Amino acid sequence: QVQLVESGGGLVQPGGSLRLSCVASGFIFSDYTMSWYRQAPGKERELVATITTASDSTNYADSVKGRFTISRDHAKNTVYLQMNSLKPEDTAVYYCKAARWGWRNYEYWGQGTQVTVSS
């Protein structure tokens, strides 16, 4: 059974930090590109950051560049999102996604974790 379980969300003041974790199971973690998305109330889900299978490439949304860092630990089947200098506009539900492309494409999503940035 495929599972992606996010954790680490919560309430933080502007300028603060949080680290999100996403633990994967039920598939070969090292074969999948991992991403973090977020969705704020009334807005479409947007891509925040992506990391390739070998961790040799990362990409970020312009809005989080220089503040967020995505990483992965293959030994723990976990992908992380370190979020620093948080702003109120970072408030959203954050989702983890696993994707693999080939003769057949696979895509799995987690259930999301709420991040609220407010004083």
Image (cartoon, rainbow, N blue to C red):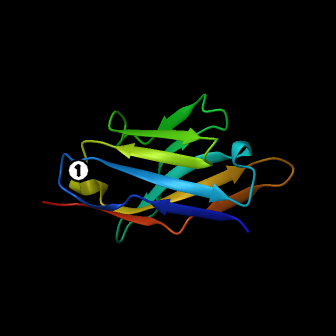
For the residue carrying disc 1, how many other residues have a C-alpha within 10 Å: few (<14), some (14-19), or many (20+)? Answer: some
The foreground one among 100 and 6 is 6
Q: Is residue 41 above or below residue 84?
A: below
- For this rendering, which residue is in front, 41 or 81? 81
Specify whether 55 is left or right of 87.
right
Residue located at (53% from left, 57% from top): 96
SS for dot 1: loop
In this view, the residue in front, 98 or 21, is 21
- In the current view of this chain or complex, which residue is farthest to the front? 75
Amino acid type of the residue tagged 1 in the rendering: Lys
Residue at 18% x, 51% y is: 14
Q: Position of residue 33 (x, y in %)?
A: 65, 44
Residue 47 at x, y percent in the picture? 49, 51
Question: Residue lying furthest left in this view?
Answer: 119
Which quarter of the picture shows residue 93?
bottom left
Quarter where residue 107 is shown: bottom right
Residue reaching furthest right?
Answer: 103
- Give the residue at x 60% y 33%: 55
- Side of 70 relative to 34 (left or right): left
Q: Quadrant of the C terminus?
A: bottom left
Q: Label 1 belongs to which residue? A: 87
Instruction: Answer above or below: position of 98 versus 10.
Output: above
Residue furthest out toward the top: 56
The quadrant of the picture occupied by the N terminus is: bottom right
